[in-house]
Image (cartoon, rainbow, N blue to C red):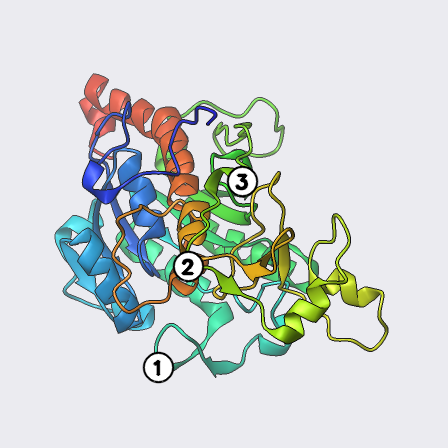
């Protein structure tokens, strides 16, 4: 196995942070926390995640079982952001983190048809307008004034008419007093055995941005220098493959699988050759020599060389979840598919600590006057 900064094969029982990483204890609070993919990433990178907010009681129970947070708010973010009794500790965060549900912008979703529409979503039982949750997160940012805010979403938010949401997101962060920039990252270059493209909006408070080095490559952008370019070796499926608890294809899907051709992306490619057939847009093929395709919230990735779906163990490996994670009654593909891969978040958090937070902490130690705001 090629050496990587963070290993995909790890255990909660190993403890935090990851081997070779300094524990610095910079405080983080996680919104839309799901099972804690982001939380584990921050902890692997030496952060202290003090609490979470999650609407779905089932997901929250799983999070609490595995992470034992100091603060756990199981409620809608709209209720959470309007609380008048939030712990003082949440007003002294280094990072406010969140992954607003993204199906409204996903390439495999309804996109524009769902924008502005109240709908029931798998995370919780109440109706919500999913495409406005991002702005609830920014409202919370305005209230708590963390030093840094990080929000993750799907690549589709950068496409087509969804770009207007990006413009509004950036505008609202600026109104809240932050410099912000979007980063499109692919997990397969970050030590994750999965090709998962995600957009990260990273915002830093104006008063702190002024204390950091400027980006010399951007003439009209005052966002401070932050290198999030990764070139770690890709991890192919054959390295994480486990021949146990196999989930065979149904006879119908097997009949489609039989028509596959090398380098088909999935069943949709097969059916492009057959007019009038279903598209199966989200059913991707897994090749031994490549990272797995993006893991969805279901068993939809199928092995090219074997007529079976990816199994739970392979999903855990491909999502860089710990080997001893307790999923309780949650389905493995759903929880992993809804989560940021921990190693992906660890890579980002590690860069932010080394390039921003450590610099700001140094300023604090050298200049108490400036440090009061840090």
Dot 1 alpha-carbon crowd within 10 angstroms: few under 14, some 14 to 19, many 20 or more: few
Choose the circle earlier in sequence order: 2 or 3: 3
Distance of label 1 from label 3 (alpha carbons): 39 Å
Choose the circle earlier in sequence order: 1 or 3: 1
The percent position of residue 324, horizontal first and vertical second, equals: 26, 49
Which residue is tagged 1? 125
Which residue is tagged 2? 245
Distance of label 2 from label 1 (alpha carbons): 32 Å
Which quarter of the figure has residue 27?
top left
Which quarter of the figure has residue 338?
bottom left
Q: Secondary structure at mark 3?
A: helix
Looking at this view, name the residue that lies furthest to the top.
Answer: 366
Which residue is tagged 3? 238
Question: For the point 47% across and 34% down, which residue is it?
Answer: 191
Front position in the image: 253 or 109 = 253
- Give the side of residue 357 with respect to residue 232, left or right: left
Nearer to us of marks 2 and 3 is: 2
Q: How many badges with numbers are in the image?
A: 3
Q: Is residue 175 visible?
A: no
Choose the circle earlier in sequence order: 2 or 1: 1
Dot 2 alpha-carbon crowd within 10 angstroms: few under 14, some 14 to 19, many 20 or more: few
Q: Is residue 72 visible?
A: yes
């Amino acid at each position: 196995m090629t050496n990587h900064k963070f290993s995909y094969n790890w255990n909660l029982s190993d403890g935090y942070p990851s081997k070779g990483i300094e524990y610095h204890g910079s405080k983080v609070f996680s919104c839309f926390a799901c099972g804690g993919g982001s939380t584990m990433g921050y902890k692997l990178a030496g952060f202290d995640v003090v609490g979470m907010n999650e609407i779905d009681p089932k997901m929250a129970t799983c999070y609490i079982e595995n992470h034992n947070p100091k603060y756990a708010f199981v409620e809608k973010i709209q209720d959470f952001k309007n609380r008048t009794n939030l712990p003082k500790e949440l007003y002294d965060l280094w990072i406010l983190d969140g992954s607003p549900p993204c199906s409204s912008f996903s390439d495999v979703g309804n996109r524009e048809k769902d924008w502005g529409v109240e709908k029931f979503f798998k995370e919780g039982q109440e109706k919500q307008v999913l495409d406005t949750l991002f702005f609830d997160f920014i409202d919370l940012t305005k209230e708590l004034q963390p030093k840094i805010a990080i929000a993750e979403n799907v690549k589709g938010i950068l496409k087509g008419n969804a770009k207007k949401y990006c413009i509004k997101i950036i505008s609202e962060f600026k109104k809240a007093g932050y410099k912000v920039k979007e980063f499109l990252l692919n997990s397969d270059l970050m030590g994750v055995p999965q090709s998962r493209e995600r957009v990260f909006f990273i915002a830093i408070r104006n008063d702190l941005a002024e204390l950091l080095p400027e980006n010399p490559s951007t003439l009209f952008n005052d966002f401070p220098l932050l290198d999030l370019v990764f070139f770690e070796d890709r991890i192919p499926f054959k390295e994480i493959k486990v021949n146990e608890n196999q989930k065979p294809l149904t006879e119908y899907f097997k009949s489609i699988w039989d028509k596959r051709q090398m380098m088909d992306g999935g069943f949709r490619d097969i059916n492009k050759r057959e007019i009038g057939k279903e598209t199966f847009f989200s059913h991707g093929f897994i090749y031994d020599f490549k990272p797995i395709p993006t893991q969805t919230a279901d068993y939809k990735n199928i092995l090219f060389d074997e007529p079976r779906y990816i199994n739970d163990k392979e999903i855990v490996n491909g999502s860089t979840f710990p080997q001893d994670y307790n999923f309780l009654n949650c389905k493995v593909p759903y929880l992993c598919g809804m989560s940021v891969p921990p190693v992906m978040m660890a890579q980002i958090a590690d860069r932010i600590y080394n390039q921003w937070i450590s610099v700001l902490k140094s300023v604090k130690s050298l200049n108490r006057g400036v440090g009061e705001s840090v």
